[in-house]
Amino acid sequence: MPRKVSYGVDFDEEYDAYDDYHDDYDYNHGNGIDENETAWEPPVTKEEIVYQNVWRCPICTYDNDEYMSSCDICGVLRNPLIKSSNNGQSSTVDGICTNFGASMMAKSLFTSLPYESPRGGVTVNFQPQKDDSSRKEDTFSLHVHGKFHDLHNAIISEKSYKVNIAPFKFDTPSPDDVVSLGLKSYKLGSKVVPNLEKPSTSDAPSNKKIENANLKSNAKSSNKSPPLISKDKPQHMENNNMTQTHKISSEFNNMTMSAESGTSKIANKGKMGKTGITASRSQYKPEKWMLLDEGEDRLSQLNLAIVGHVDSGKSTLSGRLLHLLGQISQKQMHKFEKEAKLQGKGSFAYAWALDESAEERERGITMTVGVAFFNSKKHHVVVLDSPGHKDFVPNMISGATQADAAILVIDASLGAFEAGIDSAGGQTREHAQLIRSFGVDQIIVSVNKMDAVQYSKERFDNIKLQLGVFLRSCNFKDSNVTWVPLSAMENQNLVAPPSDARLLSWYKGGSLLEAIDAFQPPAREYSKPLLMPICDVIKLPSQGQVSACGKLESGALRNGTKVMILPSGDIGTVRSLERDSQACSIARAGDNVAVTLQNIDANVVISGGVLCHPDFPVSVTNHLELKILVLDVQTPVLIGSQLEFHIHHAKEVARVSKIVSLLDAKTGKVTKKSPRCLLSKQTAVVEVMLQGEVCVDEFSSSRALGRVFLRSSGTTVAVGVVTRVIVDDQS
Ligand code: GTP
Ligand code: MG
C-alpha cells in the first residue's frame, strides 16, 4: 500500500486561505460499507456536492470563491456563461468525471468564433457497463455528440496567439551538466577538513537562528585561503576526470567554472561528529557485503516521479496502475470508491489510493508526495506521486528530487493543457524544468484524459508539437522522451494495448507499462561512503524507537552498522531496516528505506538531516557559494534578496549576500564581476547566507546533496549547484 511522505509544507504553513475550511465529514468509515463486497464498479457520481457562493471549476472540480475569475487551483478561466451553460445538458457528464470535457475557457473562446459552435459539442455521456471479467469491468461505452474537431480547431487557432509558449530559453536546465563541465577550471581544494571539536548535542538540531549580524556577510570567502588539507586534492583531480568524459550537448554546457570559485573549507564548526575522524571520500574502501553481488537476483530499483499540472490525473493514473498491477485489491478499491462517492468525490476514487489524508481527499488535491511500489519486468518501481498545486511545489521538490526518471502527466482536455503550459503559473512548465534540474533526463509524457478529447490524434499531435518545443528547450533529448496517449479513467493504454477503436486507429506505440520498462536502469554509487538524506522521521516513543526514512544516495547499510546523524553529529547504530515496507537485511544505494536506529536521542534525527558514514561526514553550514541559473523572473535577484532555499529535504530562508560574477552561458567565462542584479536566464556565481544550517556537499562530490532550488513568492526563481562551502571567519 502507498505510504505518504510528509515534507513539511502543509496548508497551515503555506496556504492560510484553507484555514477556514472545516472538516465536515466523518472519516471513520462508519458508513455502512460492506467490507465483504468485492465486486468493483467504476465510480459513478451523479451529483457532486455544490457549495454556496462558489463556482466549480470544470477541469479540476475545485470550488472557487464567487469573486475568482479563474480557477485558483488549475488556472482555468471562469466562463461568465458557466451558470447558464449549466443547464443539465451540455456540460454534464453523467458518470465518472463531471465536466471534464471542454473547459469553460474553451467554451468562451468557442462562443467568440464567427460561426456557430456545437453547443453540445463536447457532451460526453459515460454509461458504465458492468462486466464480470476483471479487465473489462473498467471499460465504458462513450457517446459523443457534436463535432469535437470543430471545437478543437477553434481552440487551436484562437489560442495560437493567446498562449505564450515561446520556447523557454532554459539554456542549462541541468545543474548536472553545468557542474560536470564546470569542473574543468574548478579550483582544487579541500572539502572535508577535520574539526576535532566535539559537537554539543544541544545545538544539534537545525533551524538554529543566526544573528542578524551574521547575515551582514562579514564572512570571508575562502577563495584566498589555502586548502586546509592538501591531501584532498587528488579527490578533486579525480572528479575532474568527469569533465573529460562528459560530452558537450548544448551551448551552455561549455560553461566552465569561474575563477572566483576558490578552494573550499569545511564549515562544520563543532559539528563534525563525535568521532572526530574524517577522511577524503576517495579514500573510502567499501566492504564486500556492500557491493551488489553479480549473481544477486534483484530488479533494478527505479524511483519514478509522477509530476505535472494540478489535476492532470497524476494520482488517478498512479492509483489505476497500482490497481491493475495487483497492488491494490478489488476490495480496497471498492472501499475507496464507496467512500469517495459518499463525499461527493466519486471521480477521485483511484486518486484516493495515493491521496490518503482527509484534507487531500476533501479538497481533491494532493498535498504531499505519495509513495507506492510495483514491479515491472525490469524494474522495481517506486512511484512518487507529486502534488501538482503550485502551493505544494516545495513538497514536490523534496520528493521528486529522489527521482531517477519521471512521468510528466498532461491533461489533454481543452483548456487544461493550455493552463499547464502557460508561462504564468503553469505547473507543467515548472515541473518539467525542475525535473530536468534534478538530473532526470529520461521521461515519459503521458497525455492523459484522451477520453475527454475523443482520443483525437489531432489533439495529441498538437500537444506533442507544442510541449516538444518546450521540453527541448529544457534540454531533454527527443530520444529520451516517450509520448504515450492514454486515459487513466478509462484504462486505455496503461498496462495493455488500447481497446478503444479511436485510439487504436492511429496509435501504434507501446503502453505506459512498456514505456516504463524501457527506462534505463540508473547508475548507483554502491562503492561510495554512506549518504542518506532524511526525508521523513517516524518516532515510536513508547518503544523508544526512531526511524529515519529516505533514499540511500550512496553506500550501503545493514543491521549493526554505525551511522552518523547530521547535523548533530551523533552516532547511532542501525537496529533494523525496511525497504518498501518489508524488513530487509541489507539496503544499498538507490533503495528507499526506513532505518530504525538505536543508542540515539530521537530528537537529533530530523527531516532535512543526513545519515552518513561516521568517517566521511558532509558539511553542515549556513554559508554557501552557488552557481545558479535564473529562470523566468518578474523581479531581478539582488544582493539582499530573501529567497526560499531548498536542498534535498531541507528548506531554509536564504539571503543573497554577494553576487560574485555573471557568467557567459556559452563559454562559462566571467562576463562581469560583482553585477548589481540578476535577470531572467542569466547564469551567475552568488553567495547565500542561510538562516539555519543545512547538511550539504559540493555538487562535484554528491549530486544529491549539492543541488539547490531557490524560490520566491510561490515560484522557482533559480536552480543551481553548490560550488563551495564557505567558512566564516568568526575570530
Ligand atoms: P493534484 O495531485 O492535485 O495535482 O491532482 P492530480 O494530477 O493527482 O489529479 P487527480 O488524479 O486527483 O484527478 C483529478 C481529476 O481528473 C479527477 O476528477 C479525476 O477523475 C480526473 N481524471 C483523472 N484521469 C482522468 C482521465 O483519464 N479521464 C478523465 N476524463 N478524467 C480523469
Ligand atoms: Mg494527485
Image: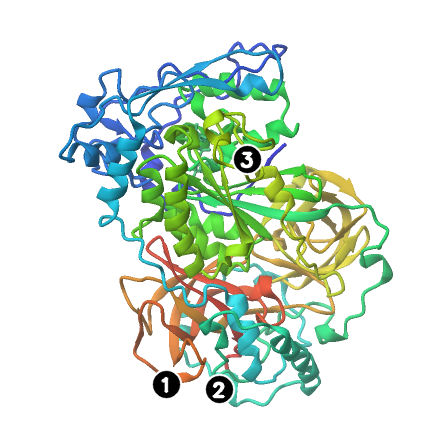
Q: Which residue is mark 3?
A: 318
Say whether residue 389 is visible.
no
Q: Left or right? Give the position of 696 relative to 449.
A: right
**Which numbered circle lies on residue 259?**
2
Q: Position of residue 703 (x, y in %)?
A: 59, 65
First in sequence: mark 2 or mark 1? 2
Q: Left or right? Give the position of 414 relative to 247.
A: left
Q: What element does badge 1 sit on?
A: strand
Q: Tell me the quarter of the picture where residue 680 sits.
A: bottom left
First in sequence: mark 3 or mark 1? 3
Q: Position of residue 675 (x, y in %)?
A: 32, 81
Q: Which residue is mark 1?
A: 673
Decide if ligand 1 comes within 8 Å of the CB at mark 3.
Answer: yes
> What residue lies at 50% left-to-right and 16% top-to-bottom?
338
**CA separation in Å, label 3 and label 1:** 48 Å
Q: What element does badge 2 sit on?
A: loop
